[in-house]
């Protein structure tokens, strides 16, 4: 980078440091205003370039996540995670935090299969932290939601088609259909209650220090 670019790096870093970590909208605005320059920072140029790009992109993803812009947060969090992985920075607490909110962003964006994969890795890496097992179970449950839908459809078809399936005694098929629907709904409710109870307990262990030296 030329001298003007290096000066821009310094100014950008200073402007970043002046934003409070709780000023999410202000930080999003800061990133959007400097997006083109940030995206073209060469992380191989120096440690200063690396850490500036990492902390800006990572905190941008965090700000989007904390303002419930989950779909928008995914790409930034994914990029920050890739940077840390490529530079062997995976032992930092910040790496765990980014993976955690990346998984949650995928979950709340209804990408349950990918979220499940992320939380599977997290719970494997941190078996002592119940929060990741809890998120994995949530994601796994949601990814199998199609089974519930199929059972409800089958139950409905049995009720509607009872007189055609067993015209001599249609109420038997209707009862079977109602039973299928009732058991499906009850089973789903019980699983949700168990998941919610476990998640409430595990939530107490949630990571609370997102920056860990990167601000």
Image: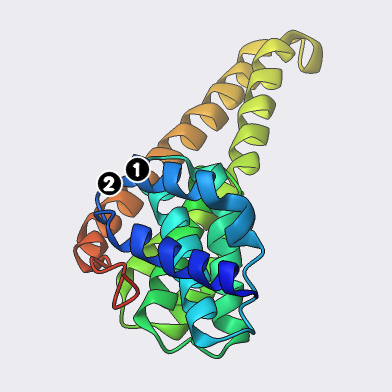
Q: To which residue does mark 2 refer? A: 23
Identify the residue shown where x is 59% and y is 76%. Answer: 83
Taking 131 as reference, is 85 left or right?
right
Can residue 34 be seen in the rendering of this structure? yes
Near-viewer residue (65 or 204): 65
In the image shown, does 49 or 68 lie closer to the viewer? 49
Residue position for label 1: 26
What residue do we see at 66% from left, 20% from top? 173
- The residue located at (74%, 8%) in the rendering is 163
- Residue 96 locus on image (x, y percent): 41, 75
State the SS at label 1. Answer: helix
Between 168 and 190, the one nearer to me in the picture: 190
| Looking at the image, residue 102 lies above or below residue 80 | above
Q: Would you say 56 lies left or right of 80 here?
A: left
Q: Is residue 197 left or right of residue 116?
A: left
Tell me the residue at 58%/82% (across/down).
Answer: 85
Per the model, the C-alpha gap separating discs 2 and 1 is 5 Å
- Above or below, comparing residue 37 to residue 122 in the picture: above
């Amino acid at each position: 980078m030329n001298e003007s670019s290096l000066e821009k790096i310094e100014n950008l870093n200073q402007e970043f440091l002046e934003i409070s970590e709780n000023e999410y909208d202000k930080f999003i605005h800061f990133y959007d205003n400097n997006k083109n320059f940030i995206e073209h920072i060469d992380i191989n140029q120096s440690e200063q370039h690396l850490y500036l790009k990492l902390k800006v992109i990572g905190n941008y993803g965090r700000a989007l996540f904390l303002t419930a812009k989950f779909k928008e947060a995914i790409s930034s969090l994914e990029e920050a995670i890739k940077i840390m992985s490529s530079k062997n920075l995976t032992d930092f607490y910040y790496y765990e935090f980014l993976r955690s909110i990346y998984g949650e962003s995928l979950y709340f964006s209804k990408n349950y299969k990918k979220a499940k994969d992320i939380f599977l890795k997290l719970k494997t890496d941190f078996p002592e932290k119940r929060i990741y097992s809890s998120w994995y179970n949530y994601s796994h449950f949601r990814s199998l939601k199609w089974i519930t839908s199929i059972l409800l459809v089958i139950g409905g078809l049995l009720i509607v088609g009872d007189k055609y399936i067993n015209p001599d005694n249609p109420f038997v098929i209707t009862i079977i259909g109602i039973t299928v629907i009732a058991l499906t709904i009850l089973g789903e409710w019980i699983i949700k209650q168990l998941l919610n109870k476990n998640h409430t307990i595990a939530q107490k262990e949630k990571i609370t220090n997102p920056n860990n030296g990167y601000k």
